[in-house]
Amino acid sequence: MLKKNLVCIVCPNGCDAEVMMEDGQEIKILSIDGCTCDKGKEWVVQELTSPMRTIASGIPVEHGDFKLVSVRTDAPIPLGKIFEVMTVIRHKKLKAPVAIGDILVPNPAGTACNIIATRNVAFMAV
């Protein structure tokens, strides 16, 4: 038997979750203690079996009133895909204008998310 401690990030409570698991190649959760809500227990299971993350970054913009536009994923992606998605973001360049919510990169690295703009960047004449 294996014990793992996690701090839940679902809400501001930050519950200390204690998970008992079976030893072995496949993750088999035996018990979850310390979470004060069902959402916390769901998060623990997801975190141990299929961890997901969101990404926030920036993409260069030519002829804009800002040199970078802040971007983020519009849905969580598998933890193992972060470096592939960041490579796609690093190779992207845009031209102004850019609007909040614009889809800048659809389904990067084959993920079920989009990279979207989180700020407006207006065109500035050169």
Image: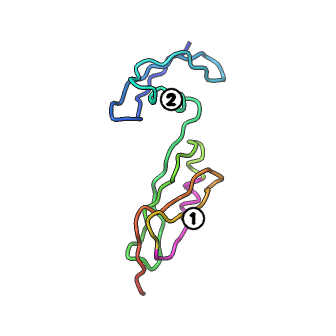
Q: Position of residue 12 (x, y in %)?
A: 33, 35
Residue 24's disc number: none
Per the image, the residue denoted by label 1 is 91
Q: Residues within 10 Å of mark 2 (few under 14, many from 20)?
A: few
Residue at figure coordinates x 51%, y 43% from the top left: 53
Q: Nearer the viewer, residue 6 or 97?
A: 97
Quick one: label 1 or label 2, which is nearer the N terminus?
A: 2
Task: Quadrant for the N terminus, please.
Answer: top right
Q: Nearer the viewer, residue 112 or 125?
A: 112
The residue lying toward the viewer, choosing from 9 and 26, is 9
Label number found at residue 42: 2
What stretch of residues is rendered in magenta? 85-97
Question: Can you give x and y, in whole percent of width and height, for residue 43 in the image?
Answer: 49, 31
Point out residue 125 in the picture as x, y percentages from the top left corner: 41, 86
Q: Give amino acid for label 1.
A: His
Picture layout, residue 64 above or below residue 68: below
Measure the C-alpha gap from mark 1 to mark 2. 35 Å
**Is residue 92 shown in magenta?**
yes
Q: Is residue 17 above or below residue 60?
A: above
